[in-house]
Image (cartoon, grey):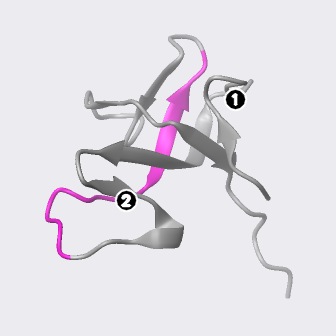
């Protein structure tokens, strides 16, 4: 899977996605986790397609401004 720029497209459906968000000198990114930054949280974000807004979860109000996103991988098959 490749990162998708939010400038090019956004998800069609609401749901959880892997996001890349750069804030200041560090970034939230599962593939390049930078430690120790206590503000870094999970980088799986919830996208609300109706409001076209990113949040850390479907119940939080902290809006994110990721630059890139990608679908989560499929669950492993046994």
Q: Distance between the residues labelled 1 and 2?
A: 19 Å
* Quadrant of the image occupied by residue 26: bottom left
Quarter placement of the N terminus: bottom right
Magenta-tinted stretch: 36-49
Q: Residue 27 placed where, x, y %?
A: 35, 55
Circle 2 is placed at which residue position? 42
Helix, strand or loop at disc 1?
Answer: loop
Q: Position of residue 66 (x, y in %)?
A: 46, 37
Q: Name the side, left or right, on which 50 lies relative to 54.
A: right
Q: Which of marks 1 and 2 is nearer the N terminus?
A: 1
User: Residue at the front extreme?
Assistant: 25
Residue at 40%, 30% in the rendered image: 65
Q: Residue at x 59, y 46 (%)?
A: 17
Q: Is the magenta stretch mostly helix, strand or loop?
A: loop
Q: Is mark 2 on a helix, strand or loop?
A: loop
Q: Is residue 56 covered in magenta?
A: no
Q: Residue at (62%, 29%) from the top-left corner?
A: 14
Q: Nearer the viewer, residue 59 or 43?
A: 43
Residue 24 is marked as: none
Image: 17 above or below 26: above
């Amino acid at each position: 899977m490749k990162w998708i720029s939010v400038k090019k497209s956004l998800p069609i459906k609401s749901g959880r996605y892997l996001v890349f968000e750069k804030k200041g000198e560090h970034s939230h990114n599962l593939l390049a986790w930078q430690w120790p930054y206590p503000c870094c949280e999970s980088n799986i974000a919830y996208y609300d397609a109706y409001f076209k807004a990113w949040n850390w979860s479907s119940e939080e109000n902290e809006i994110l401004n990721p630059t890139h996103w990608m679908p989560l991988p499929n669950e492993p098959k046994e």
